[in-house]
Amino acid sequence: MIGACSIWGLSPLYYKLLTHVPPLELMAHRTVWSTVVFAGVLALQGDLRALRGAVASPRVFATVVFAALMVGCNWFLFIWSVIAGRVTETSLGYYIFPLIAVLLGVVVLRERLSLWQWGAVSLAAAGVLTLSIGLGILPWISLVLSTTFGLYGLVKKRLPMGPVASVTAEAGLLAVPAALWLIHVGPGGAGIADLYTLGLLIFSGIITALPLVLFTAAAQRVNMATVGLLQYLNPTLQFLCAVVIFGEAFTPVHAIAFGLIWAGLALYSASSLSQAKSLAQERARRKMAQTSDASLPY
């Protein structure tokens, strides 16, 4: 899990090496090569037949298409933001993503929040409002990144496919227009200009697929509270890349806004850990009660 989050968090360093490649062309290469890697992983698992699930019904196919659009929008905006020197905003987006996901759960799935969780969401909203007023502009990059990723996660909950198969199907759908775009650009495109650049572009498929494989393997072995907490490693590393390495501006307004959002995340994490602990204790009590009942001489 740490490996997956570290690759995601440090990926701006990689994409900074490709600032000479137009964002749309870079996105096309990332999509095509990640599809190749995903399909290879699925083949090694002997599970290529699972791709049939993407067309199992019109409803499932529509869900896969929507998921592909959301992840495609997320990928492209992230690439564009790195090239444009706005990594601070991408880190903010991934910081507020858990709270956007909570709001989507309330609105779409009718989930209920505790008082503390509502407080966490309110602090995040106050952070976004502070940034909007202080800088005179809505942090749209952060909001679009967090919302598209939140909607992506929401529809994936209802997708009757394994994680690798579903993301292979999604990338495969995006690979069709991506390949057409690369054909349109032709051999004179930036991606074919030299072997070094071409090698970096091909490698984008690996750094897209590898963290997903690591994340999937880890999610099966660690509890969700740990998964949730380690997710903050990604935006933290992005934030450090932006401010410490890339030298992006971090004004007092940014400090106040980030402080409010960090406080909201701390509140949300504490509440989630408390709920997880209470649930574990309740399960333990039920298990003990069942064991006691089974020992009675009925």
Image (cartoon, helix red, strand yellow):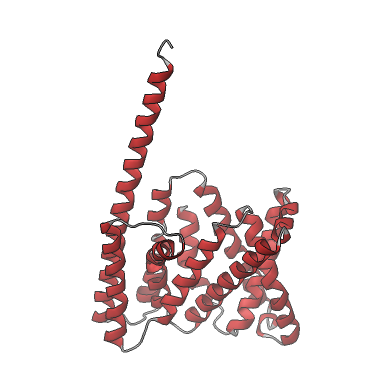
Residue 48's spot in the image, x, y percent? 74, 54
Name the side, left or right, on which 77 lies relative to 133.
right
Displayed quadrant of residue 104? bottom left
Quadrant (top left/top right/bottom left/bottom right) for the C terminus: top left
Q: Give residue 173's position: percent from left, percent from top.
A: 69, 70
| Whole-percent x, y for residue 102 in the image | 39, 62
Residue 177 visible in the current orientation: yes
Which quadrant of the view contains residue 114?
Answer: bottom left
Q: Is residue 219 left or right of residue 124?
A: right
Looking at this view, name the residue that lies furthest to the top. 297
Tell me the residue at 66%/70% (across/down). 202
Q: Nearer the viewer, residue 176 or 115?
A: 115
Residue 187 in sight from this viewpoint: no
Vertical arrangement, residue 88 with respect to residue 38, above or below: below
Residue 257: x and y, percent?
28, 75
Q: Number of numbered discs present? A: 0
When the figure is inspected, residue 282 is found, relative to residue 294, above or below; the finding is: below
Q: Residue at x 75, y 52 (%)?
A: 49
Q: Can you say whether 125 is above or below 64 in the image?
A: below
Q: Quadrant of residue 279?
A: top left
Residue drawn at 37 percent across, 71 percent down: 239
Q: Is residue 294 left or right of residue 129?
A: right
